[in-house]
Image: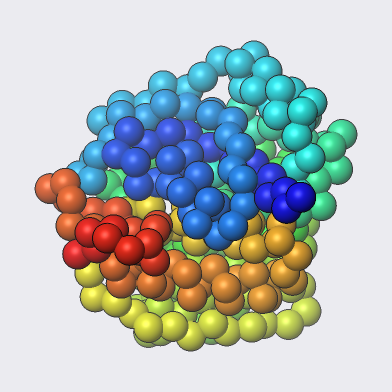
Amino acid sequence: MNVLKQVLTIAGSDSGGGAGIQGDIKAMSANGVFALSVITAVTAQNTEEVTDVFELPVSIIAAQLDAVFDDFEIAAVKTGMLSSAAVISTVVRLLKPQQVGQLVVDPVMISKSGQALLKPEAVEALTKDLFPLALLVTPNVHEAQQLSGIEIKTLADARRAAKVIAQFGCHHVLIKGGHLIAERGTDLLYDGRFFQIYKGEFIDTTHTHGTGCTFASAITAQLARGKSVPDAVQAAKTYVTEAIRHSLAIGHGKGPTNHFYFLQGNGAQ
């Protein structure tokens, strides 16, 4: 009997369906695993903006975590939006006893429209308490700048920032470099000793809503299926590039990536 690997995402919801929990589940499913979810916050958002955020009580976050770990054999975990120190503390407290070997932390800090998704006072809890548990941390350029204090415009800048972020205790750092001015579409992986560069095609489209969540979730799924970190990153990059290439011009703002672009009759734009 072929049982799918079970992978957990811990994140906020996106009523627009392209990012957050909804985007994570789609990306994980598209990469061949069964997705489980723990919702940390409910956001009111669409392709144009985030209009409101409601953080769930930590008791219900804890209850969700207990429920999934009590019943499922979880091969990997990905965290996304953890909006406050209290939420981070709850997640850390319940993840530690599970000894999750494959934890991917996507440090969601701000939405594409500029809405803060992580309270400033929670950054220390994120780096001090959660990062040391992580196999991989996946900041984009803006998040890497905030975490490292280094302005990033080139790959050399990204290398310096990755070294700073690694000092928080995570095993690997992947700086998602889609916004790099000098090397667009290039990502940088650091394992504490060596760097690996993933050059990719930069697809000129505005429809990129959920790209970061999708990339990190695809990596997590590939790790659960047995790939090494470098190979999981490569497989996920190939996937997300095609999801962006076939992105959907829906809504009136930045449309979502097309998580199931490979299905026939998917209406890709």
Q: Position of residue 160 (x, y in %)?
A: 60, 75
Left or right: where 112 falls relative to 102: left
Q: Position of residue 228 (x, y in %)?
A: 74, 71
Left or right: where 213 falls relative to 224: left
Q: Position of residue 230 (x, y in %)?
A: 68, 75
Looking at the image, which is closer to me, 153 or 210? 210
Q: Tell me if residue 231 comes above or below residue 75 in the rendering.
A: below
Name the image quarter holding residue 93.
Answer: top right
Image quarter of the C terminus: bottom left
Q: Tell me if residue 261 comes above or below residue 254 in the rendering.
A: below
Q: Residue, x 66% and y 38% (percent of image)?
A: 125
Q: Residue, x 50% and y 72% (percent of image)?
A: 237
Q: Residue, x 32% and y 33% (percent of image)?
A: 15
Left or right: where 123 falls relative to 231: left
Q: Tell me if residue 259 comes above or below residue 22 in the rendering.
A: below
Q: Residue, x 64% and y 14% (percent of image)?
A: 59
Q: Position of residue 99 (x, y in %)?
A: 86, 43
